[in-house]
Image: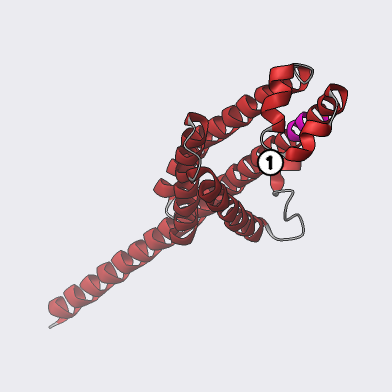
Amino acid sequence: MGFFDKCICCPCLSKEQSVKVCTYVFTALEILSFIISIGNGSFRQVISSLLSIAVIASFIYLLYAMKTGNPKYLNQIKLIFGIVLALEVLNFIIYIFAAIILFFKAGNRIVQLNYAGNDFKNFFKSSKELETEIRTYAALKIIGYLVGVFLVVNYYLSTINYINELLKTLEVENSARKEESGIKEETTKKEETIKKEETTEKDITA
């Protein structure tokens, strides 16, 4: 997959270490996001909190699947990650659109009053100053969300890439183990056959 071989956050580590370290980092960020959003009772923040719980659960399951090396769990995590990725990107898109709307409505007096809030300093600013400030704030949010989308997509795709490689390795190891087991069984059967023949010959001679 080229660019998505490793997460861009940890390019110097091995693929396994990169996935683990990035997973721990993203888990910590999601927990922080959950703590911040849980105090806000708005509908959007409630949805964000639920999404954070789902993401944290998927990260824990990923680490467990990697530790056990169970192909069943690893295949399940691919499906779970696909769903979580779609929800994460959708969440970012909603925030990006909200920031874009804020950017283009920065000149609206109601928007400016809502932005000013109870901050006493903002009441001494002109409408033009508030508009410029709101546009800058919205632009920074848009850039931040786009960076967030990039990091999330990069992490999920590099993780899926690593899981696919791990599954192939496990498949090869299982095949080699079965082949080795088959050879041992065949050798054992031959040895038993030889022993039976030798016993039969002894009986005949006797």
Residue 187 in view of the camera: yes
Residue 99 in view of the camera: no
Q: Position of residue 174 (x, y in %)?
A: 45, 55
Residue at point 58% right, 27% down? Answer: 90
The three-letter code of the residue at mark 1 reads: Asn
Determine the residue located farthest toward the bottom in the rendered image.
Answer: 206
Residue at point 84% right, 31% down? Answer: 125
Q: Quadrant of residue 115?
A: top right
Residue 168 placement, left or right of 108: left
Disc 1, SS: helix
Q: Eyeballing the image, is 178 above or below 187?
A: above
Q: Position of residue 85 (x, y in %)?
A: 56, 35
Q: Which of the pair 131/147 is nearer the observer?
A: 131
Point out the stretch of residues depicted in magenta: 136-142
Which residue is the site of mark 1? 154
Q: Which of the pair 203/152 is nearer the observer?
A: 152
Q: Which of the pair 149/16 is nearer the observer?
A: 149
Residue at point 24% right, 76% down? Answer: 198
Q: Position of residue 104 (x, y in %)?
A: 77, 17
- The overriding secondary structure of the stretch rendered in magenta is helix
Q: Eyeballing the image, is 181 above or below 191?
A: above
Q: Position of residue 152 (x, y in %)?
A: 65, 40
How busy is the neighbourhood of tag 1: few (under 14 within 10 Å), some, or many (20 plus)?
A: some
Quadrant of the image for the N terminus? top right
As for residue 137 lying within the magenta part, the answer is: yes
